[in-house]
Image: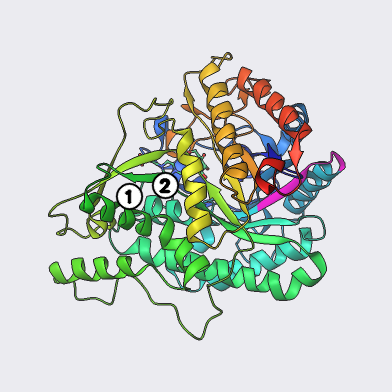
Amino acid sequence: MFPRGFAWGAATAAYQIEGAWQADGKGASIWDTFCHETGRVFGDQNGDVACNSYKLWDEDLKCIQQLGLTHYRLSVSWARLLPDGTTQHVNQKGLQYYNKVIDDLLAANVTPMVTLYHFDLPQTLQDQGGWKSPDIATLFDSYARFCFQTFGDRVKLWITINEPYVCAKLGHEDGIHAPGLREPGVAAYLVGHNMLRAHALAWHSYDTVFRPKQKGLISLALNSDWLEPLDTDCAEDIAATQRHIAFTLGWFAWPVFVTGDYPEVMRTFIEANSKKLNYTGESRLPFFSKEEPAILGTADFFALNYYTSRKVTSASGHFGSLSMKSDAGVQDILNPSWPISGVSWLAVVPYGLRKLLSYIKKNFGDPAIYITENGFAQVGSLEMEDVQRAEFYKQTISEVAKAATEDEVNVCGYFAWSLMDNFEWADGYSARFGLFHVDFLDEKRTRTIYHSGKEYAKLIQMYSSKHFDTLPDELSK
Ligand code: GBH
């Protein structure tokens, strides 16, 4: 069972679905630039058209209704709304598009959850230093305020930034996401820092200026695998697991939910590695300024993107190169018994979500939790009878139900990734995460429900009919 009012949703992100990359005065984003360079993305594919949702929103809405969703999570393309990234110039057509999406959702009795930033920085801001520049925080805050002002009368659930970890590490350390920088051991920490500053400024703006009237909630979405020691009796593996969590989820959740600062072990290990390498620059992990608004407490709920799990062991003799991996000194591996989805990084581990939910309850102050993404990829084009994915959703959702009832985790909602097949970043269109199939060879980008979509709709129906108010009877005795 699930609590009354539990949110049943699906999620998408602007660059992955909208297309229309130059339509009606939209500015370019770093993903437009990145995809247009050769060798960046699988098959040199791009999001120029994607699902064409900018033109085909009506079709998306039909999909949402067919699933019986109570909630829909979308992101706003910063450069579609503000082509040069600043509020100096507003693209009215972009504004109309998001107004229509929001109005149509509400008219269909679907609650929107809006993400302000899902990887697609306006290119003009990248040209000024992007997330590495300290100025980005106030620029993001202005954009966020503009959105609260414009949409906040109707939008009550906000995500500032999606997966700062991915943006910082994959975009600035590994170079496999836009802007494609490879500056290991330095840039990611700086980017993560500025993302936290940006998030906090926007949270404070909402809290003081908009919340009194608009009465919504705002957080940031953090991705995390469930991590467990390879050898549960080995002290080194246990320590390595804690360190791995600190360098991934903890990097952002610790400052926001626990102390206002990074996990201590992150700083000590980074400093130790710097020393070892005779790295003489300033500390690679920046410090928060006391002059700026606090980071601690800047989340009204915990937004979790969960996909998979890993076993962790310590990397012996790991120090010695300038990289996050070397700083953390950990290795993570897949348990060979876990089934793999269509993408190699995604092993199917439903119980990991239940464990992670309990971990969050215990370590981050028993917050209200929305699972803002969870999903399964299929490779290959036309397998409409995707039984493995249907089974994945069934099992995962039943783990969430156990978390809600047996573990008393305050879980408020679940969003499947994704409503439909879309542009899967570096994997292009090769990985399909949708509940609806999209035909990318057809100009009309026809959406067709998968078997898993039908099953998800049934799960929503079944679970919505039997809910509990606070605790189920068995537990309140
Ligand atoms: C989410 O990230 C994103 O928010 C969403 O946009 C995306 O479509 C969805 O997941 C599915 O991927 O290639 O071995 O370096 C999820 C977290 C972290 C998962 C990075 C993939 C890359 C592993 N992602 N990870 S690897």
The stretch drawn in magenta includes residue 232: no
User: Mark 1: which secondary structure?
Assistant: loop
- Establish if 164 lies above or below 41: below
**Is residue 39 placed above or below 236 in the rendered structure?**
above
Q: Which residue is mark 2?
A: 177
Crowd tier of the residue under label 2, counting other residues whose Cα lies within 10 Å: few below 14, some 14–19, many 20 or above: many
Mark 2 C-beta closer than 8 Å to ligand 1: no
Q: Pick the quarter of the image with the N terminus.
A: top right
Residue 442, x across and y down, in percent: 62, 20
The answer to whether the residues at label 1 and label 2 have Cβ atoms under 8 Å apart is: yes
Span of residues in magenta = 107-114
From mark 1 to mark 2, how far is it between C-alphas? 8 Å
Residue at horizontal 31 percent and vertical 51 percent from the top? 241
Q: Residue furthest bottom?
A: 291
Identity of the residue furthest to the front in this view: 477
Front residue of 268 and 290: 268
Indicate whether residue 112 is drawn in magenta.
Answer: yes
The kind of secondary structure element at disc 2 is loop
> In the image, residue 406 lies at what x, y percent?
58, 42
Residue at position x 46%, y 62% in the image = 252
- Where does label 1 land, which residue? 174
Q: Amino acid at mark 1?
A: Asp
Task: Give the image quadrant in which the ligand numbered 1 is located.
Answer: top left
